[in-house]
Amino acid sequence: MGNGRDKSVLSIFRVSGDRHKRRLVPFKVMEMTGDCHPVKFAHFIFNECTHDKYPNITIGVDSDGIGDATVRELQKLGQEVVRINWGKVMHSYEDRKRFANQRAFASIMARDAIRSGRLRFDASGKAAEQASKIPCDINEMGQNVIMKKVIMRQKLNIKSPDHFDTYCFAWLMPYEAANDDSGFDRENVRVEALKYLDDYDEAGAA
């Protein structure tokens, strides 16, 4: 969710695997205008992310700040939403020792996926450019930590990585395999989507 200065971005991915084996392929990435109201964005998400188009789709929203209004509106529309609050600490003791918060975990997981070829960015180039500028460090407790966005902007003139953030969110969300349910109402949409993703895979391997 953007706040007028930043952009609101809706990214739809094909996801498989977990943690260090998670694989992410973008299917569609849409950037809203900077003045997109959070309630209006909720209706856009609701209308776009239907189970007819994307069987078993899981919707996650950055619910810190104004994103809370988007989550609440989606819930009013009857849509289940995974709240992403990546300023919170990790759940397990081992992860808390290594990562300062969920943002650090998700960013490091996305970085490792890029290096191993399990994550490829969409063709716009925005996520790739943003990812290359993220300041990461180790704090006094030995944890990975990502510089706060307000400091990134003030000290380094780095804008909020709105596109890359959506890729990172995928490491904080559960998912259901699309083919878990065979009762597709729009089989042609599914076939078209899977063909697109297979072509994308082949292009990346070439």
Image (tube, rainbow, N blue to C red):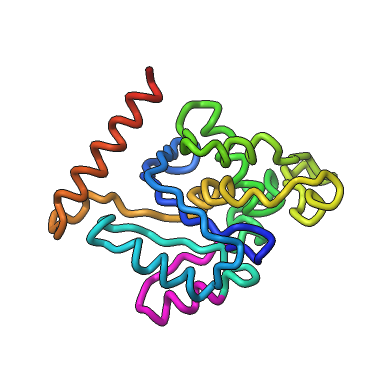
Does residue 74 appear left or right of residue 198 in this picture? Answer: right
Q: Is residue 141 magenta?
A: no
Does residue 81 appear left or right of residue 115 in this picture? Answer: left
Q: Is residue 192 above or below residue 66?
A: above
Residue 101, located in which quarter of the rendered image? bottom right
Place of residue 171 in the rendered image (x, y in percent of width and height, measured from the top left): 51, 48
Place of residue 35 in the rendered image (x, y in percent of width and height, measured from the top left): 60, 67
The quadrant of the image that shows the N terminus is bottom right
The residue shown at (63%, 36%) is: 129
Place of residue 3 in the rendered image (x, y in percent of width and height, measured from the top left): 65, 66
Does residue 91 appear left or right of residue 101 in this picture? Answer: left
Q: Is residue 168 above or below residue 4?
A: above
Residue sitting at the far bottom:
76
Residue 132, located in which quarter of the rendered image? top right
Q: Is residue 64 above or below residue 132?
A: below
- Of residue 112 and residue 26, the one placed in the foreground of this image is 26
Q: Is residue 29 above or below residue 32?
A: above
Does residue 82 appear left or right of residue 115 in this picture? Answer: left
The residue shown at (66%, 47%) is: 104
Magenta region: 69-84
- Count of number-bearing discs: 0
Q: Is residue 78 magenta?
A: yes
The residue shown at (74%, 44%) is: 143
The quadrant of the image that shows the C terminus is top left
Residue 58, located in which quarter of the rendered image? bottom left
